[in-house]
Amino acid sequence: MKSLFFSLALISIFGVACNHQEAAAPLDAGVIPDSVLKNLSIVPVTSEAITDVIRLNGKVQANESKQAKIYALASGRVGEVKVELGDYVKQGTLLAEIRSAEVAGITGDLSAAEANLNLAKKSLETTQDLYASKLATERDLAGAQADYNKAKADLNKQQQLLQISGGNNSNYYFRAPISGYVITKNIFSHSEVRQDNNNEIFTIADLSSVWIMANVYEADINHVHLGDTVTVATLTDPQKTYVGRIDKIYNVLDPVNRTMQVRISMNNPNNELKPEMFATVEVKTRSARPVESIPAQAIIFDNSKNYVVVKKGKDLVIKPVEVIKRVDTKAYVSGLNEGDEVVASSQVFIYQALIAR
């Protein structure tokens, strides 16, 4: 290390850097001590597509295809609410019940329809006997049959109404249509429920898979594509990441914040991703054509321009480059060819020695 420091010091005192950046004469590598050459990092120039990372802000949401929203189909007074927000329920579980005058009315109509059907049936049977004995006309028989059919249809209607409402007698029941977690609850014991309320009473969601909804700023829209690989992290555990792909692009901009939403469907077997969590989404993008790539540390910035030290055979020369983009430890440049070898260590000292000659 002492030998390396001493040798670099000798190189650095060849002269001071010139303010102009004209091509410097090649420096024969043979004049550099072996102790310096052995410690130089020489890296070949590679040609590859530019890999970039776009960071988006997002939020976890329940998968709409795996959730059920429950609305009130009858008005009434709430009795006991059986579940709380965040509870896991199985399909068919009783969530809450209300006492409803509307359900009581439907039950009463059902009883009336059943009585009417029994009466119409007996009337039809009597008319059929009279018709067989030629004591009733064909018209009488047709009328009795029509009354029976009407009574039967009315009963069927009332049965369907009661089945749709989910009630019985004067009670109306909220039951879980699917298995999942209660993620919305807008009902409380002893409160009133109205049928014309547009808000859902419960939302049950299966969280085995969730959606990440991310916002893409207008300037990045052309860099985000369907199928792009993304990495998702949350504030709960920033060190843990989840890998997914963009499976939906909503091609509409929000006029207020000028963003477009994209969707990432994520498997969530351990329920670590919970609805309303904030998420950071990193999208990896690649350029259409390959570009020369070198380590970013190899670039020397001097007099508002960028340079690298290139090894050609036994010579070391300075070459100006144009930096297209820097991504992490890589720099994508123009002005070099694939296969060129650049100096990626102690390049500043060698550069100063070259321009001082």
Image (cartoon, rainbow, N blue to C red):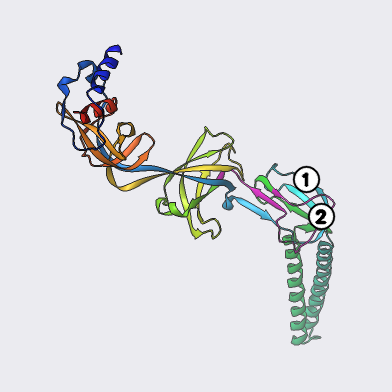
Q: Splitting the image into 4 quarters, where does residue 167 fall?
A: bottom right
Marks 1,2: beta carbons within 8 A: no
3 to 343, vertically: above or below: above
Residue furthest to the top: 2
State which tag comes first along the sequence, 1 or 2: 1
Q: Indicate the position of residue 287 as horizontal and vertical percent values.
A: 33, 47
Residue 82's disc is 1
Residue 199 x %, y %? 71, 58
Residue at image x 51%, y 55%?
A: 259
Quarter of the image holding residue 5? top left
Image height of 321 relative to 171, above or below: above
- What predominant SS class does the magenta segment belong to? loop
Instruction: Judge left or right: residue 194 versus residue 218.
Output: right
The residue lying toward the viewer, choosing from 98 and 55, is 55
Q: Distance from label 1 to label 2 (Cα)?
A: 12 Å
Residue at figure coordinates x 51%, y 47% from the top left: 265
The residue that appears at 24% across and 35% down in the rendered structure is: 45
Along the line of sight, the residue nearer the viewer: 38 or 97: 38
Q: Secondary structure at mark 1?
A: loop
Quadrant location of the C terminus in the rendered image: top left
Q: Quick one: label 2, few (<14), some, or many (20+) residues within 10 Å? A: many
Q: Is residue 187 magenta?
A: yes
Where does the N terminus fall, quadrant-wise? top left
Say whether residue 242 is left or right of residue 178: left
* Amino acid on which disc 1 is placed: Lys
Residue underneath mark 2: 98
Magenta span of residues: 184-210
**x, y (%) of residue 20?**
24, 38
Label 2 SS: strand
